[in-house]
């Protein structure tokens, strides 16, 4: 399988679960910088322009799943700039992958509050919704949109963004309580990775999965 964003918090957790899964033979990491990860299952390509995979197409065939965990905060960004990174980059990569691997399952990490109508007042939610909708229209074997709310790192995963790291530090004591009282509000990096693997192998009953759906799928409840 192919994994984008392995250096981020979610990507770190997803990579861990992939490496632990005996069904996963190879994980191709694609990112703008090297992760430094060492494992016999890992292949890694450092590629600066994620939205244009044409120069590395020879390395992208023969994969049956893609986990797209790249993302950026919209704080301080114009809608146009945020769209260039969020929509253009994701769709550019996906268009190449679906051409090379039409039998692939594509899983995109979006976020709670994404606006599927593309008409709402919140810019980031509109852009995420537009991205999701474009992916769902592509002729992949299957495509799933993961919309987690709070995510608890379980095995030392760390977010890259300082603001996210600070917010997570403040919220970490509350996440176990949220998991217990309201699973629709929180999940974990471990559950994210397991749910993605299950969706890639066996499919899921929903195309768009919120935190509660992710938690249920990760435990085998589809």
Image (tube, rainbow, N blue to C red):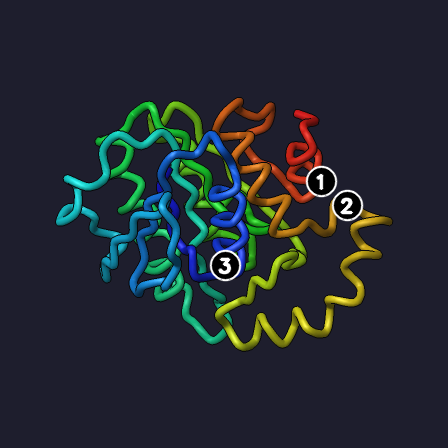
Q: Find disc 1 in the rendering and name its residue.
A: 212
Which is more foreground, mark 1 or mark 3?
1
Between discs 1 and 3, the one toward the N terminus? 3
Residue pictured at 57% horizontal, 26% vertical:
204
What is the x, y in percent for residue 23?
Answer: 46, 30
Q: Label 1, label 3: how many angstroms apart (C-alpha)?
A: 22 Å
In the image, 57: left or right of 86? left
Which is more foreground, mark 2 or mark 3?
2
In the image, 9: left or right of 142? right
**In the figure, residue 194 lies in which quadrant?**
top right
Which residue appears farthest toward the front when viewing the image?
40
What is the x, y in percent for residue 189?
Answer: 60, 52
- In the displayed structure, 78 sits above or below 25; it is below
Q: Are discs 2 and 3 less than 8 Å apart at CB?
A: no
Look at the image and tell me in which quarter the N terminus lies. Answer: top left
Q: Label 2, label 3: how many angstroms apart (C-alpha)?
A: 24 Å
Look at the image and tell me in which quarter the C terminus lies. Answer: top right
Q: Find disc 3 in the rendering and name its residue.
A: 124
Between discs 1 and 2, the one toward the N terminus? 2
In front: 128, or 217?
Answer: 217
Q: Secondary structure at mark 3?
A: helix
Number of marks in the image?
3
- In the displayed structure, 161 sits above or below 135; it is below
In front: 36, or 145?
Answer: 36
In front: 208, or 156?
Answer: 156
Q: Secondary structure at mark 2?
A: loop
Q: Find disc 2 in the rendering and name its residue.
A: 183
What is the x, y in percent for residue 219?
Answer: 69, 33
Q: Are discs 1 and 2 less than 8 Å apart at CB?
A: yes
- In the displayed structure, 40 sits above or below 121; it is above
């Amino acid at each position: 399988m192919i994994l984008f964003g392995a250096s981020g918090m979610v990507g770190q957790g997803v990579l861990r679960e992939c490496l632990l899964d005996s069904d996963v033979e190879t994980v191709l990491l694609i990112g703008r910088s090297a992760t430094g990860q060492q494992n016999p299952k890992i292949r890694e390509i450092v590629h600066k322009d994620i939205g244009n995979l044409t120069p590395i197409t020879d390395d992208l065939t023969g994969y049956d799943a893609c986990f797209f965990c790249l993302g950026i905060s919209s704080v301080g960004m114009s809608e146009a700039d945020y769209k260039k990174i969020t929509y253009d980059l994701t769709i550019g990569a996906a268009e190449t992958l679906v051409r090379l691997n039409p039998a692939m399952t594509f899983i995109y990490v979006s976020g709670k509050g994404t606006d599927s109508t593309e008409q709402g007042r919140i810019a980031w939610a509109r852009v995420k919704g537009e991205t999701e909708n474009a992916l769902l229209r592509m002729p992949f074997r299957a495509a799933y949109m993961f919309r987690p709310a709070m995510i608890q790192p379980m095995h030392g995963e760390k977010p890259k963004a300082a603001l996210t790291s600070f917010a997570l530090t403040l919220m970490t004591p509350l996440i176990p309580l949220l998991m217990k009282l309201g699973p629709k509000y929180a999940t974990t990096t471990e559950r994210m990775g397991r749910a993605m693997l299950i969706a890639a192998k066996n499919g899921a009953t929903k195309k768009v999965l919120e935190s509660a759906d992710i938690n249920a799928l990760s435990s085998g409840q589809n």
